[in-house]
Image (tube, rainbow, N blue to C red):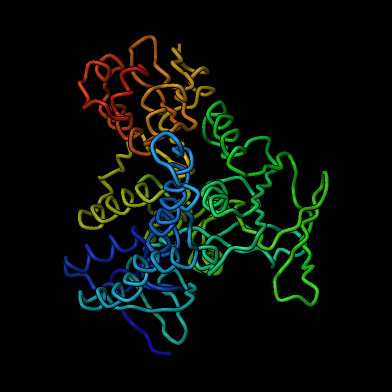
Amino acid sequence: MSEHQIDIVVLGSGPAGSTVATKLVKRGYSVAMIETREFGGTCALRGCNPKKVYVNAAEIIDRARRSEGKLIVGSDGVKIDWAKLLQFKREFTQPVVEKTEKSYRSSGIQTFQGTPSFDSPTSIVVGSERIVGKKFIIATGATPAPVGIPGAEHITTSDDFLELSNLPERVVFIGGGYISMEFAHVAARCGTHVTIVDRNERVLSGFDPDLIDLLTQYSEKRGIHFRLGVSPTSIVDASGNGSDHRYRIEMDKGPALDAGLVVHGAGRVPNVQGLELSRAAISFSDQGVSVNDAFRSVSNENVYAIGDCAATGKPRLTPTANEEARIVVKNLLEPGEAHRADYGAIPKVAFTTPSIAAVGMSEEDARKSHDVDVRADDMSSWGSVRKTGGTAAGYKILVDRDNDRVLGAHLLGPSAEETINLFALAMKFGLTATDIKSTLFAFPTSASDVRSML
């Protein structure tokens, strides 16, 4: 086994790991990058970016169909060609695979591909290579949570969904989180019979329940079926001798479901299993690596963890991981842990059709600690929404009566994923509801509706 002495060892080539590696190698550190899969990370290859290509297709179909006889005619001829959509998606992902590792090497970063595991507090093994490092940055992201039922091996992950060459007639999504809801809206626009199964009474927990109800109702009108308050108990391959797969999903309540594809949407967990963290004296839990507010391991001072694999309590989002990477770089360059993350109010979006977005406190949490003015309405009849051909839309803005500050903003509808950023900006810099309302926004735009919301 060959051995390497390295200053900085980075595990994971997603946005966070890549930021740390590229910035530190420029400052003269020797840097190693270890990646289990293709170099480039989940966001670029299997997550945010390729997913948005599929979401854009669903949005085009949805808008065309709801605009029939109003803005356009002949929308029946508009459809998604799944094979061509896959090909277009690869225009964004394939260059990342081809260029990322080459870019690392040209900048002086040593690359290692394989499954890593610590064998001491200061060393890690990848295949036949042993790397002794001064500092380790764990940025391995998240992985699908185990489903834990008989037949779980038949479940397709979101990674595989993005590589399908065609869709079967019936698809079942297990779990009602981001992945299920976003991909369900795409599949339904292809004419596929879609069912979402969730043990909760509502999908997309973490978003405003009133807006979720509006979105669910709209989703049902667009052909998405929901089985809520139930859980799958087993999945059986009932294909027989046919060439097409057919699965039977038994439920703890009600009738079983049949599908040609079962997709995992039951949440993700920190991707740290297999790293043998205990051998390196790295404390961790089911929430990830235990870190202080400088993202240093609480039990091994030479280890940092950032992004989805770190137990920070923050939303597992790409911007969050990027901010944590920025802080780790600053603290490594200026030892003493003087720098802390400045997250501000972190917006989140589920790219359903239409999208739903939130930033700040929920109504339930805000009422526990503040005197709250709740400003809410169904926007479906607003002119700005009807001009798009009509869709589900609504808002809920939470304002502190004592100081007029926005405590939380919750949006559903066209451009919600963009408009939510206005509230994030306002909340980070302490603007009042009056400040926001007094701002003259370009009209007519979705942003200009903010004044009416307030």
Which is nearer the eye, 315 or 174?
174
Q: Is residue 144 left or right of residue 201?
A: left
Which is nearer the eye, 427 or 98?
98
Image quadrant for the C terminus?
top left
Residue 137 falls in which quadrant of the image?
Answer: bottom left
Rendering coords of residue 403 (x, y %): 33, 12
Residue 222 falls in which quadrant of the image?
Answer: top right
Determine if residue 329 is in view. Answer: yes
Residue at horizontal 53 percent and vertical 36 percent from the top: 206
Rendering coords of residue 190 (x, y %): 55, 55
In this view, which residue lies farthest toward the bottom?
A: 1
Which is nearer the eye, 385 or 41?
385
Which is nearer the eye, 97 or 272?
97
Q: Is residue 241 left or right of residue 403?
A: right
Image quadrant for the N terminus?
bottom left
Q: How many marks?
A: 0
| Above/below status of 377 relative to 310 | above
Rendering coords of residue 200 (x, y %): 68, 38
Determine if residue 312 is in view. Answer: no
Residue at horizontal 44 percent and vertical 12 percent from the top: 373
Residue at horizontal 55 percent and vertical 69 percent from the top: 274
Rendering coords of residue 127 (x, y %): 47, 84
